[in-house]
Image: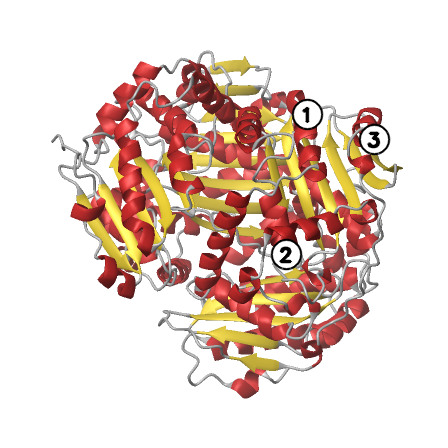
Amino acid sequence: MRPYLILTCIALIGTSVGLTQTANAQLPPWTRFTLDNGLEVLVVENHLTPIATIEIAVKNGSFTEPPEINGLSHLYEHMFFTANARDTTEDDFLGRVDDLGIVYNGETHEEQVEYYFTLPKENLEQGLDFMATAITSPLFKEDELHKQKEVVLGEFDRDEALPLFKFGRKMEEALWDGWMSRKDPLGTRPAIKAATREKMLFIKGKYYLPNNSLLIVTGDVKTEDIRRLVPKYFLRWQKGPDPFIADPPQRVPPLTHPLFVQDTVDEPRAIVKVQWHGPSIGLDDKGTYVADVFSYIITQPEHPFSKSLMETGLAQGLNFWYYTQRYVGPITADIITTPEHLQETMKIFWQQVAKFDDPSYFTDEELETAKNVLRTQTLYRSEKPSSFSHDLAFWWAAAGLDYYGHYLDDLSKVTRKDIADYVHRYIQGRPYVLGVAMSKAAAVVTEPSLAKLGNPNMEVHP
Amino acid sequence: MIRSTYYLLRPAVKPLLFVAFLLAFSACGTTHTSGSYTAPTNVVSDVQEFDVSGIHVIMRQSAETPVVSAILFIRGGDAAIPPDEPVSAEYFAMKVVTAGGTQNIGKAYFRKKIVSMGTGINGENGRDYSALSFKCTRENFDTSWAYFTDVILHPSFDSTEFENFKKSVLLGLNSRAIDAESYSTYAADSIYYAGHPYGRMYTPEDVQRETISLMQMHFKNLMVKARLVLSVVGNISRKELTDKIESTIASLPEGSYTPIKIGPPAKAFSPGAYFPPFDRKLPTDYIVGYYLAPSKGDPDYYPYLRLRNFFGGFVFNHIRVQHNLAYAPNVDDREGQTSNGMITLQTPYVDSAIHIIYDDVDFFQHNRIRESAIREGVAGWATRNYMNAETTEQQAVYLGQAVLETGDWHNAFFSYEKLASVTPDELVTAANKYLRNFNWVIIGDTAGIDKSLLLSR
């Protein structure tokens, strides 16, 4: 799943050119169609408040970035909000935002970049026109590029000031050994500094294509209006060759052995992270469903995994989750404990991991609860159309809308055997990265190491 | 002078309004808001307000949504905690009471049932009021209501949850100085509100004093009808809700509650500059600036709000867009019985940034903004208003807060008419009245910062 939970149970029927409509007892219906230039369009009507959200998602992001351009998808995202063929300065762009009453944002992730406008419904057509102009005709003016590079470098400053930033970076570097650039949307300072207008144009030409993008419109709109208006503004967007045929993205190779990461942070707690390489969309779709269900079983407060760590007071924080990705999604356990309880906590943790494939490790009720929680949280998220569009964008990029459309159905089919298979394939006996961040003084006393905190009984299969 | 500044003054030129750029960081993200358009009158209507056996209720029946949200607001908050009680008393009461089942329903069963329904029952404390709340699907409303009200009527205060929570809070307090951003806000609160009811900060000593019996007593004192406002939004009829209240929380004691009047802190009336020490070397300085702001219901509220909108846009535009001195300069308010404006930014170029901010202050204190620019800039507010009303939970929060803060749910969302009808003179007056006596707290490398500059407004 996404770091924050997003699922739906809308069934999609047919995906090629033409219009399909879906309905579901729990979620609002949506409509999906494709323009002649390959742009997929998704419409979700919600008439509770008179605003509309226009969002474009593009399959770009760190997964397309070798080290020398790592971070440029993010820089490109910043440049989207500057000059284009009609609004020829950043001031003009912001002036139009102002005129149309737009609340806007952009996000760059591993496998997608998103741009969205929320605006009064009366301004829908102008908003579509604005979005189409901005996505098709960015100018990448040198002075604005220089400014945005500084802004992005400022983000590095800000992130690096966060106490656990360095620890997180070290963990990522270990987990994605040698492939960090494919998993890090923020990128690197040298790559940002070396960015040029030509590189921006290269990204635009390769990835910013209608047939590599999804347009989502949610809120107080009429589907027939969207059917009429979208071609008017978006058909001028020229189709191009599928960027992933000529240059297929590469999956991070599996870990070969357990790794230990340590960092010092000046605080009284011990921050622990254990990560495995999890399933990938396209290679093991079923594993991704199972991963979500399993995570939601063991994090229920009354499940032994949670109780043995939280209720005992060993851990002050605990999470276990899977991040759905096409190019290797990580499985992550986050544990907050204290240095004095670190070894005991990890001993209990690994004892629990050893039981993950035990048929009696969870009850039928816990299995059903996990599925229901996933379903209910989907319902809650879909209540807010201005952010539900982001969920749709994420799932489209990571897994495809067909996957997403069948998600809850497939969750309901998850069995105990599926869970045991998942645990064997991705967790038990598999290489992992174990990281601990705590104060230097505490580390001297407890000497954290893989030998002490890792699973001594875990046989690692290459 | 920056071009967009002139635009606000020249009637013939289309204004460039950089309105309240709210930064919502997600992954690698940038957020801004702005706008102008013909605004509707009410974000939500068909709201009902009534009393049930002494409990004040605000509700909106929304047949379209399958989600129901209920929030029981409790007047008082941390600011009203008696001096002899730990100031963390309400924090503990709100968190522990919702975590451990009830006297009638064991913790394990309670948790399993709540999780299986997908219902969330939560408690939050605040400066002027606190709240217990739940959100559920319509089909689970009856059971969720029963569990929620049993927490209120028959709390269990599980000792394990209490001890674990206490340990967690203590660890959190001892970790407070790690994150420069949150520490700078904590330091600003401590300094600006020193000696004021909002200035009682949680301390390890305070938390160590917490006991289950203290927490129980505090919770019992809170649960009197005189303190309560219930806000419910969802597909629930007035009769159904009334019946539910009468059969459950109507049995709470009437009690009494005398609101305490809280005025501005002493530091609101003179400029200040403070450089609290920070152990870690930082790549940038963390700057927080506080100043007095009017609260909701104050006659100055809308002129100030419109001013802050312009001012925040200027600060963002000039510091980030024009000069690239900081990634996310922001101007916001912290509203309460007494409110403060809050400027936050991170930059190593402190003097340059402060110069720009003060130039913007001077601009608004000495220039009249065109009436049309004032009117045209409200579109972004409309969008944001509606974004704040998309879910039942958000509506319940805003409606309840409006009743508590102004006595009228109609104030739950911004009034476009009041915003659009602010006059140029009112803006100048508000700028001179509120954009002054800045109290700055800066963390990082503060050597060489021009303190006299900071103190000059």
Give whichever of discs 1 and 3 has the lower sequence position: 1
Callout 1: residue from which chain? B
Residue A243, quarter of the rendered image: top left
C-beta proximity under 8 Å, tags 1 and 3 = no
Few, some or many residues within 10 Å of mark 2 (<14, 14–19, 20+): many
Give percent across and percent down for residue A205.
Answer: 32, 39
Q: Is residue B416 visible?
A: no
SS at badge 1: helix
Give whichever of discs 2 and 3 has the lower sequence position: 2
Amino acid at the residue labelled 3: Glu
Q: Which residue was labeled with disc 3? A: B246
How far apart, in angstroms, are the residues tagged by discs 2 and 1?
30 Å
- The colour scheme used to paint the residues is secondary structure
Amino acid at the residue labelled 1: Phe
Give whichever of discs 2 and 1 has the lower sequence position: 2
Callout 2: residue from which chain? B
The label shown at residue B16 is: none
Q: Which residue was labeled with disc 1? A: B141
2 vs 1, front mark? 2
Q: Which residue was labeled with disc 2? A: B89
Q: Nearer the viewer, residue A267 or A49?
A: A267
Give percent across and percent down for residue A297.
Answer: 41, 27
C-beta proximity under 8 Å, tags 2 and 1 = no
